[in-house]
Amino acid sequence: MSPEQYLTQWQQSQADAESMYPLIGKLYREKGVDIHIYGRAMVTASTIDVVKAHRVARWYTGQEVTTEHTLPLLQALSNMDLPPCRVDLGRLASLYWSEHEDGTALEGFLERAVADLPKGNALDAPRDVVLYGFGRIGRLVTRLMIEKSGPGYPLRLRAIVVRGGRDGDLEKRASLLRRDSVHGPFNGSILVDEARNALIVNGNYIQVIYANHPSEVDYTAYGIENAVVVDNTGMWRDTDGLGQHLTAKGAGKVLLTAPGKGDIKNIVYGVNQDDIDDADTIISAASCTTNAITPVLKAMHDRYGVESGHIETVHSFTNDQNLIDNFHSGDRRGRAASLNMVLTSTGAATAVAKALPALKGKLTGNSIRVPTPNVSMAIANLNLGSEVERESLNAFLRDTALVSELAGQVDYTQSTEIVSSDIVGSRYAGVVDSEATIADGNRCVLYIWYDNEFGYSCQVIHCIEHMAGLRYPMVPTPQQS
């Protein structure tokens, strides 16, 4: 192409993306149809994000899929009577154009693609959600729920429960939601209603309830019923402790955003969410590291068989550590987090077995806390049941990220320049760094980046949806792809 043609092509792609944006919003707000492009969520994406998402096909598969290919499909989908679902427009367009180079029979193709979708709404009525605690994960879950809110999304964030209540507390809570040193400013409007102790976030009325214990809360006093209570505090991790939430009027189920103890099911969405029964009232979303490594480990075990392995996590420091040297009940964690690499233990490797029992007793693990505020890496040194070559292994991991049932959890990069700050804001549980992959006989070493705050919060959202009975079938299915 000539230099002028590059610019013309870009401008056309941008114009197409601008045409797509209102259609994406309409499908989501009115029908609950969530449009993705090769795993990238498009509901709140900018026009530039839409254009960039199309490049994934060329990067990873060598196949060209442009806005010119996807726009006709999106226009046709917007006129169809669709139930709530997730549509990967990139994968769908790839299938269509590979079968119909002349651009004919589009309606028939789409009718077949959605033929098996269940009819009706995802839920019969909206479901209330309460956040118990408003720390790092609580605020990011809030951002994600507000981003999703609308007529097509049946979950409603109704309240947050925090300690405090002093003068200025509400404004400070709002400020922490509005501005974040790692994740940037909130994309929207936040109003403070001091008289009613509430935040109005992009039009969503969120009650702020001050309480020191679940027994002090009556959710029904605020019109909240049968709520999914998301415990972000980590104060209780067993059935007895978390069960205290269920004594509060208006509480229906509890989700813990930390590893659960005892007989509590630890759920890594994408791997074992089907273990959640309707009768379950207390569930754990496991840890950020367990969520990062388990989907990749499942894919590896299903394909090659994992005989044994060691997981080393290089993890950003957390609020549990001290900024400067001071007393801490944990070994080494009293040393200055901002100045040191701190060797510590992690239960993530053994916790994998709770979501993936086939790996019970096969993994060990340790963690090194490092002086960065967010984004971590898991290094998985695995002994496999069969020999593997680096090229074929990376091809398998790429396909896992693009077209498998784990495509929503596993991302893949082949950049030779990627560093931790590039992963901030990643919506995936883990991102495989293919350039770092090592393979030697039946042994391999995988490097998995993860945003231990935002990526994990996305997994938490998936768990909330599943506990509430919200299911989003995928179009196309992995089998169709």
Image (tube, rainbow, N blue to C red):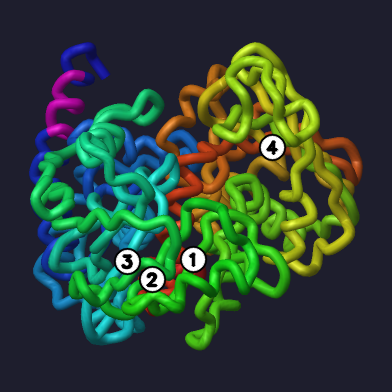
- Residue 129 bears which disc, if any? 3
The first of marks 1 and 4 along the sequence is 1
Q: Where residue 289 sits in the image (x, y, percent)?
A: 64, 45
Q: Secondary structure at mark 2?
A: strand
Indicate the amino acid at tag 1. Answer: Leu
Mark 4: few/some/many CA within 10 Å (<14, 14-19, 20+): many
| Marks 3 and 4, how far apart at CA | 31 Å
The nearer-to-camera label among 1 and 4 is 1
Indicate the amino acid at tag 4. Answer: Ala
Q: Is residue 270 left or right of residue 266?
A: left
Residue at 24% across / 63% down in the picture?
158
Q: Are marks 3 and 2 in contact (CB under 8 Å)?
A: yes
Indicate the amino acid at tag 2. Answer: Val
Compared to residue 268, the image places residue 249 above or below, namely below
Question: How many marks are shown on the rendered structure?
Answer: 4
Q: Are marks 2 and 1 in contact (CB under 8 Å)?
A: yes
- Residue 255 bears which disc, if any? 1
Which secondary structure dominates the residues rendered in magenta?
helix
Residue 35 is drawn in which quadrant?
A: bottom left
Compared to residue 201, the image places residue 362 above or below, namely below
Q: Nearer the viewer, residue 380 or 1?
A: 380
Q: Nearer the viewer, residue 449 or 459?
A: 459
| Marks 2 and 1, how far apart at CA | 7 Å
Residue 177 is drawn in which quadrant?
A: top left
Residue at 60% across / 32% down in the picture?
376
| Marks 1 and 4, how far apart at CA | 25 Å
Residue denoted by label 2: 228
